[in-house]
Amino acid sequence: MVKNGSLYRRLLSDVRGEVMSDPASLARYSTDASIYQMIPDAVVIPRSTEDVKAVMSVARGEGFSVLPRGGGTSQCGQTVNQGIVLDNTKYLNRILDIDVEKRIARVQPGVVLDQLNEALKKHGLWFPVDPSTASRCTLGGMAANNSSGGKSLRYGIMRDNVRAINAILVDGSEARFSAETPASSDYADLVGDMRALGRREASEIDARFPKVQRRVGGYNIDALVGSDINMSHLLVGSEGTLAYFTELELNLAQLPGEKVTGVCHFSTFRAAMEATQHIVTLNPQAVELIDETMIALGRDIPLFRDTIEAFVKGNPEALLLVEFAEGNAEDNAAKLVKLSQLIGDLGLSFTGTKSRWGGVVSITDTKLQNSIAEYRKSGLNVMMSMKEAGKPISFVEDCAVPLSDLADYTAGLNEIFDRHGTKGTWYAHASVGCLHVRPVLNMREDKDVSTMRAIAEETFDLVKRYKGSHSGEHGDGIVRSEFHEKMFGQRIISAFEEVKHRFDPIGMLNPGKIVHAPSMDDRRLFRYSQDYSVPDFETALDWSAWPGTGGGIQGAVEMCNNNGACRKLKGGVMCPSFRATRNERDSTRGRANTLRFVISGQLPGGLESDAMLDAMKYCVSCKACARECPTGVDMAQMKIEVLSAKRKKGGLTLADKLIAYLPRYASKAAKVAWLMNIRNKIGPLRKLLESPTGIAARRDLPEWSSVPFRDDEAQDSDPQVLLFADVFNRYFEPDNLRAAVRVLRALGLRVAVARDDHTERALDCGRTLLAVGCVEEARHEAKRVIDATRDMVAKGIPVVGLEPSSILTFRDEYLALCPGPQTEMLAKATHTIEEFLAEQPSLPLKPIDRPIYVHGHCHQKAHDVVTPMLNLLKRIPEAQVNMIESSCCGMAGAFGYAPETVDVSIEMAKLDLFPALDAAPVNAIVVADGTSCRHQITEGTRRQPMHVARLLEMVLDD
C-alpha cells in the first residue's frame, strides 16, 4: 500500500532515483532530532540534478511541497514536513573539486562534513565549521541551517565560509548565487529586487538585528546591505525554503597545528559564566562548557566513563574546556600557563574551599584531547540518555547573548526554570555566549507542553532584554519561527515574507519554516501527539530499566532522539549495515523509528509485521549501538524481541532450525564430518541445498572437525580457571580450545571445562537460539550455564571463553534473560581469554619477526575488550601489533551465509576490513577471535587468520 498513488506513479515515471511511498518508509522520514513529526507524501532519493528538477516539476503540477533533506539531524523541526522529501545523502554526495592553492572546495549537497575533511587532511586543510554532528551532517544541510560549532570564535559560522551556491529555483531554472554581478536575466532581476529590499530596510535591519556573532534566526537580509553583497549568504540559513542547493563552493582553512586543552574547574556555575569573558582575551580556539549534570550522565555511559575520570578533578559544578592551537608545544604551554594564572587571579585554586575551589587541569595528550572532544560533541545525546519519561527538550537551547551578560542571563534563565518546576542542563559554546540549555520536560503531558510554551515566552523576553539572539546555532524550524516578530518586529517580518514570496510565490519549498509558521506547541505536529499511546504487550526479555509499556521496552525504543550518530560512515562500528547500503531503513535510527511506529499502532501488524522484519533484515546484531549510541539504544536486543514475535506467529523454517539447534545436533554431525563437509566440494549440491537450508551456494560452510574438543580434555582438580567451550570452537576449530588450555597451563593454572553434570549434553550459551527468536529455549540454556557454574563462581573462579559472541552473552543477554543475583555474579566472573590473560603474569614467549594485524569482533568492541587483546599481543617480544580500524566484518553468524543478505555481508567487509588486509604485508599474521570473522577473511582475502590463543601457543617458549 502506498500513500497518494497518483503522485507515486508520476514520480516513478519521471525520476531515475529511488521513490518510496510505503507507510514504513514515510514513517522513517517523518522525524528529525526535534520534538516534531509530520508524515511526508513521498520520499525520493535523487541520483542527479535532473531527478531533482523532475521532482520539482511533479510537485508544481500536483500541488505538493518539496523538502530537501541531509542527515536529518535538525533540532527545531526544519527537516520534517508533508509533501515530497528529497534525501541527498545516498547519491548526491560527491566532492567535485579541491583547489589547494586557493583553498576552495566544491561539493554536492549530500557530502558529509567528515567525508570532506578526510579528503582535505592530506592537503593540510579543513573546512572549519565544526558542528558536533560532523560525522553525519551534510554540507547542504549545514548551509541551509547556517551551522556553526566549537571553533566559531576563530573561524566564524557557515555564512562566513560559503563563497557561492548553485541552486534550482522553484520554477525549475538554475542560478549561481555569489558575489558576482549577474548579467541581464531573470536571476539578475531577482538580485536587483533583493538589493533594493536591502537598501530600503537598511536602517531597520541595523536597529533590530542582534549584534552577536551567533545570530542565525530569520533570513539573512542583513547580507543585502552595503556594497559587498554575496547573494549566497541570503540562501545560507534559509532552511530549504528559497531554493534547492545543487552545489556549494566553500572557503577552506589551514589545519591547526599542535593543540592543548586547559580544563577549568569551577565550584559554581556562575563563576564559570563570569570567567568566560576573561578567558576569551587569551585568544583560544574554543571555550566549551560542561555542567555537573552532563558529567554525571557521562559517567554512567561506558563509552565515556574512562575519559571523564581522566580529566575531571573532584566534583565541579561546571567545567570550561579551553582549547589553544598555537601550532607548537612551546607556545601552547605558554598559553596554559597564562590560563592558570588567569584562573588564579580570579581567586580560584584546588586548595581553596567552597566558592574559592577550582583550577586548571592541563591536557596535552592528543588521544585524550580527542576523547574529550568526542565526549563534548556528544553533549546532546549524553543529555538525552536520561531513562525517565522526562527528557531535556530543545526549544530555547541555543540563544546567544553578549559575553558581558552571560552570567546574568544564565542566572535569569535558571530562575525561569525554577518558577516552572524544572531544571536545565547546560553545555556548549561559552566562548560566543551560545549555551545549549534544555529544560527537562515530558512532551506526552499537556501540562509540560504548556510549561514549554511559558518558558519559551519568558526566555525570549529575557534574550531580547540583553539584545541577544533567540536562535544562535540550530536555526528556526517549527520551534522558533513564530517568535521572529517578537525578536525582530513586524516590519522585518514583512521583509522576510517578501523574500519568501519573491523566491517561492507558490509556497512550495518547505512551507511553514521562517515565515507563516505554525504554533510551536501545536501537539498535532508532535512526535508524541495527543493521540499517541503504546498499549501494553508481552515481551520476552527484561526491559525494567526503562519506563513504559511492554515491560519498559517502550522507554528503551523512545530513547532514540533521532540525532543520527548511527549514520556515521567512519570510526567505531555503528551502524555497519547503514554504511553498506546508505539506506535510512538500515540505520539504528531507522529501525528505532519503525519500532516506535509499530508499538504505538501507527504502523499496523505488530512486531512480527513485514515492515518490522524488513527494517531488521540487515541488522547484524553487532551490539555496536549498545556502546556507541550515546543514548544506549540496543537494537540487537530489540531485534531478539522482533524475532521472538515472528517465531511465535509463524514458527521456524528449516533454515532457522539448522541455526538454532546447531549445538544439539553438532555432536552427531561431527561423527560423520566427512559427509557434512561434502556439500562444500560439489557445486550442484550447493545450489540444490541453497533454498531449503538458507545457505548461499557461493559460500563455503565451516568445515566440521572429525576430532571435536571433549570436556574431559581439561578437567584438572581444584581448578583455578573454568573454561567455557563454545559450539563453534568445539566442533569446527577445536585446536583453538586445545591451544587455550595449553596457554593457561603454561601459566601454571589448573583448568577445568564448564559442564553440566546432570546431562550428557554440552553446555550451550544459547546464542544460536536467540538468533532466530527462540527466547524461552535460550533462557533454558542460560539457566543450565548459570547452574553449572554457580559453585565455581561463588568461590571466585573466573569463567573464560574464546568465542566473543558466546562468552560475552553471559555479560549481556543473560542479564535480560535471567535477571537476578546469580546471573550478575556470573557476568562479573566472565572474561574473554585475552582479558583474563592480560591480567596474568607474562607468559614465556619467543620473539616474532612478523607484523600482527588484529581485527576485533563486534562484541569485543561493544564490550571494550579489544584493548586487553592488543596489550596481550604487545607482550610478544619484538611484536609489531596493528589494530585494523574497521566496522563489522559482515559475516555476523548466519547473516553472511543467507542468500538474501550475502551481498550486503560482503559489502560490509569491503568498506574497511578487506582493504586493510590487502594493504598489509604479505607475511602479516592476522588475528581474529570471532569464528565468523575468520571465515569472512578467509573467503574474501588470501589470508588465513587465527585465534589469539593459537598465536600465543605458537610463540610459547617451552
Image: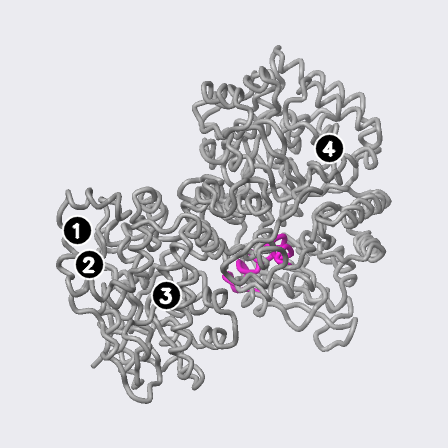
Q: Are marks 2 and 1 in contact (CB under 8 Å)?
A: yes
Question: Is the Cβ of the residue at disc 1 closer than 8 Å to that at disc 3?
Answer: no
Can you identify the residue that label 3 sits on? 806
> Is tag 3's residue or tag 4's residue first in the polypeptide sequence?
4
Residue 922 can be seen, yes or no? yes
Does residue 635 belong to the magenta stretch? no
Is label 2 in a helix, a strand or a loop? loop
* Residue 50: percent from left, percent from top: 47, 20
Q: Magenta segment, which residues?
A: 363-386
Label of residue 46 in the image? none
Is 380 covered by the magenta stretch?
yes
User: Few, some or many C-alpha atoms within 10 Å of disc 2 (few <14, some 14-19, many ≥20)?
Assistant: some
951 left or right of 315 in image: left
- Figure quadrant of residue 519: top right
Is there CB contact under 8 Å for labels 4 and 2? no
Q: Say what secondary structure mark 1 lies in.
A: helix
Look at mark 1 in the image and give the residue it sits on: 680
The image shows residue 642 at horizontal and vertical percentages of 47, 51
Asked if marks 1 and 4 touch (Cβ < 8 Å), the reply is: no
Judge from the rendering whether residue 4 lies leftward or rightward of residue 709; answer left or right: right
Query: Which residue lies at the image location 49% right of the left edge and 59% below the top edge?
Result: 540
Can residue 123 be seen here? The reply is no
- Tell me the mark number nearer the camera, choosing from 1 and 4: 1
Residue 896 location in percent, x, y?
Answer: 31, 49
Mark 1 or mark 3: whose residue is earlier in sequence: 1
Query: Which residue has dot 4 on it?
Result: 218
Under mark 3, the amino acid is: Ser
